[in-house]
Structures are given as structure tokens and as C-alpha cells.
Amino acid sequence: MNFTRILGLAAMATLTATLSWAAPLRLTPADPQPKGLKSGLSVRYAYPDDVKTLRGAAKALEAGAEVGPPLKGLDYRDTSIGQNALTSKRSENVAASIRGYVKFDAPGIYTIDFLTNDGMRAVIGGRVVGKFDGRQTCQETFAQKVEVPKAGWYPIQVLYFQRLNTSCLHMRMGPKGSRVTWMPNKAFGR
């Protein structure tokens, strides 16, 4: 093994250990708690000529976005080539701003991760809980530990983009000591 590779492996081990010992991010619940929410999440779309980064997606949305059909939740499986991304009008070069609330049924420590194709930044309760700024097939983000101080609704904002070929966007969560599982659509409100 060459020296550069050994240094790279050592850096990865240090990062992994640091992440596993890091304190959970404390989420802030919606205040006041929303009442009478409709199921799902609100979404606005932009359709740039090309999108490769979260910054490019944000700029496209700022330049002109349109309201799209609400998302049922965050469980959009990997599409086939040519199928539209989420509830958008296109399969490629799509930027999305997703907003609403996610409900936690009990306080505690949870692990959250996402699967995304391509880029995505998710903020829940004021904290970035998932991020990938690039292009990839449907793959996981780094898992993030969060502290939910009380049961209830927490604001969620997701900036997402899909560039070429297939798309996906999923959220998974699990309480401390359990595996992460898909978030049911009923956990989201708008």
C-alpha cells in the first residue's frame, strides 16, 4: 500500500470515529405547532438547462419556480430513464424546493439518512440533517444523529436536484439502537 493511500484510510477512520462520537443535533419543533395540516409536502420546481450543484439548483429556483403537485412524502423510488422526477414535469434537469413538516411521535435520539439521486440538502428543525452536493446514482447520505426534545411537528426544507437519467429521494429514520427504516407518508404534513 502506498503512503498516500494509508493516509487516506487513516483520515477516513478518524472521520468515522469523530462522527460516531459527535453529539446529536438538537432539533427545534415548530412553534406554534401547526393544526389542520394536509398530508404530504409542498414543492416548487424549476427547469434549468443544466444543473450540477445545490447552488445551481437554488439559483434556478430563485430565477423562476412554479408550484408543483404536492409530494406524498419522501419515498420516491429510483425511476427508470424517462420517468419524471418526483411530481415534476420532466425527468432531467429538475430543481425542487420542498417544504412542510415532519412528525416525530416521541422525544429521543434518532438516526436520519436519505437516499438521493442527484443532490440534496435537508434541514429539519433548523439543522442540516442530510446533504450531498453532486451527482450520483440513488445512494445514501451520511447518517446523522438528532435529538428530538419533544413529540410533534418539525419544519422540514429540502433543496433537491436531478440532472440526468434516473432519480430518487427517500428519507429514513430510526430510534437510537434501531435500524433506519423508510419514513411513512403519514409522517409528513403541509
Image (cartoon, rainbow, N blue to C red):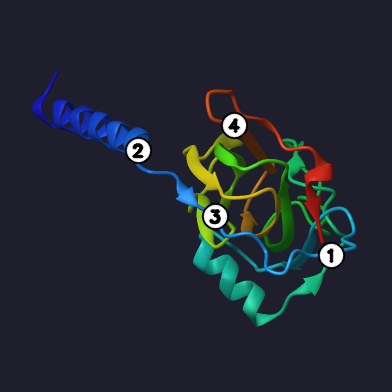
Work out whether residue 115 or residue 126 is closer to the camera in this orientation and state it: 126
**For the residues marked 3 and 4, what is the alpha-carbon distance in whole angstroms?**
14 Å
Check contact, mark 1 vs mark 2: CB within 8 A.
no
Expressed as whole percent of the image width and height from the top left, the position of residue 38 reads 90, 59
Check contact, mark 3 vs mark 4: CB within 8 A.
no
Q: Secondary structure at mark 4?
A: strand
Q: Tell me the residue at 64%/67% (across/down).
A: 49
Residue 101's image quarter?
bottom right
Expressed as whole percent of the image width and height from the top left, the position of residue 19 reads 35, 38
- The image's mark for residue 68 is 1
Q: Tell me the residue at 29%/37% (across/down).
A: 18
Q: Residue furthest left?
A: 3
Q: Secondary structure at mark 1?
A: loop
- Which of pointers 2 and 3 lies earlier in the amino acid sequence? 2
- Which of pointers 3 and 4 lies earlier in the amino acid sequence? 3
Identify which amino acid the numbered label 2 is placed on: Leu
Expressed as whole percent of the image width and height from the top left, the position of residue 59 reads 57, 75
Tell me the residue that label 3 is attached to: 27
Q: Nearer the viewer, mark 2 or mark 4?
A: 4
**For the residues marked 3 and 1, what is the alpha-carbon distance in whole angstroms?**
28 Å
Mark 3 crowd level (few <14, some 14–19, many ≥20, 10 Å Cα): many
Position of residue 58 relative to residue 110, above or below, is: below
Work out whether residue 71 or residue 34 is closer to the camera in this orientation and state it: 34
Q: Secondary structure at mark 2?
A: helix
Tell me the residue that label 4 is attached to: 175
Quadrant in the picture for the C terminus = bottom right
Tell me the residue that label 2 is attached to: 19
Identify which amino acid the numbered label 3 is placed on: Leu
**For the residues marked 2 and 3, what is the alpha-carbon distance in whole angstroms?**
17 Å
**For the residues marked 2 and 4, what is the alpha-carbon distance in whole angstroms?**
17 Å
Identify which amino acid the numbered label 4 is placed on: Pro
- Which of pointers 1 and 4 lies earlier in the amino acid sequence? 1
